[in-house]
Image: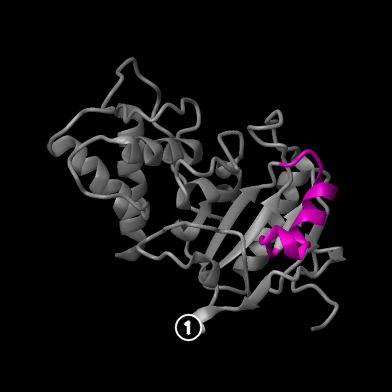
Amino acid sequence: MTAAPDSALATLWCPAPNREPRRDGRVADLLVLHYTGMESAEAALDWLTREESKVSCHYLVDEEGRIAQMVRESERAWHAGQSLWAGETDLNSCSIGIEIHNPGHEFGYVEFPDAQMQAVEALCLDILSRHPIRPERVVAHSDIAPGRKRDPGEKFDWARLARAGVGRWVAPAPLGEDQGLGPGDEGPNVLKLQQDLAALGYGIELTSTYGTGLEKVVEAFQRHFRQERVNGYADASTRDTLARLIAAKQSRVA
């Protein structure tokens, strides 16, 4: 293994032991953004490069915008865990993972500093220049593991990345007074919501019933695309934002 990072933006090359070849000849066509959920970037880097952690990631961006690489982009890192997107479950084999230092919801969730966001934006663009990753396949850890993960969370600036050409985004519909669909609801409107979320890529069963699983997926959607209110209820704002995202995705395919 060479001692040079794949990205010229990385100033530290710190190989992680938890890495392996991508399975079934897969190439990277998914980009997953995480937060570290630890009290310091140094602690995160130490943990991500320990064999006993059973985790790893391709890159880590600290709060000052410094970038470390731990796994080569051509290799499979262990960052996605139990997850699902667009029908696939072995997301580690088709993804590149970026850990962004933030203490997260458990340790006093804070805003992502501008220097850090600048570095994340630049790194994402650099990765996209080398890999065939479509906008709808730039996702949050919470998107691929709803209910299990909340990162990078509702304070992360997805709109900024989209303006730079990273990921899919539409301006969220304004909040209203309606509660919308929620736990316990059933029927065709719930089924349509499930179908729309599945069309975007979320792992969801089409049951026509608003159960805990759907509530967690709606929360994940809101953390990424409608961040002003994250409550798991599919109000008109949430459903309208979702519909316009699907339309944007379909117009690109067409």
Splitting the image into 4 quarters, where does residue 79 fall? bottom right
Q: Residue furthest top?
A: 177
- Residue 131 % position (x, y): 57, 73
Query: In what quadrant of the picture does the N terminus appear?
Result: bottom right
Asked if residue 54 is among those painted magenta in the image, a careful observer would answer yes
Q: Between residues 254 and 182, which one lies in front from this camera angle?
A: 182
Q: Between residues 55 and 2, which one lies in front from this camera angle?
A: 55
- Residue 206 % position (x, y): 21, 49
Task: Give the colour scheme of this rendering.
Answer: one colour
Q: Identify the amino acid type marked 1.
A: Asp
Residue stretch in magenta: 38-58
Splitting the image into 4 quarters, where does residue 102 fall? top right
Asked if residue 90 is among those painted magenta in the image, a careful observer would answer no
Q: Between residues 170 and 85, which one lies in front from this camera angle?
A: 85
Left or right: 73 in relation to 222: right
Left or right: 48 in relation to 226: right
At a point 35% along the width and 29% down the height, the residue shown is 237
- Residue 47 % position (x, y): 77, 54
Q: Can see residue 39?
A: yes
Q: Which residue is mark 1?
A: 24
- Residue 16 % position (x, y): 76, 68
Query: In what quadrant of the picture does the C terminus appear?
Result: bottom left
At a point 19% along the width and 45% down the height, the residue shown is 207
Q: Can see residue 171?
A: no
How many residues crowd around disc 1 within 10 Å: few (fewer than 14), some, or many (20 or more)? few
Q: Between residues 5 and 49, which one lies in front from this camera angle?
A: 49
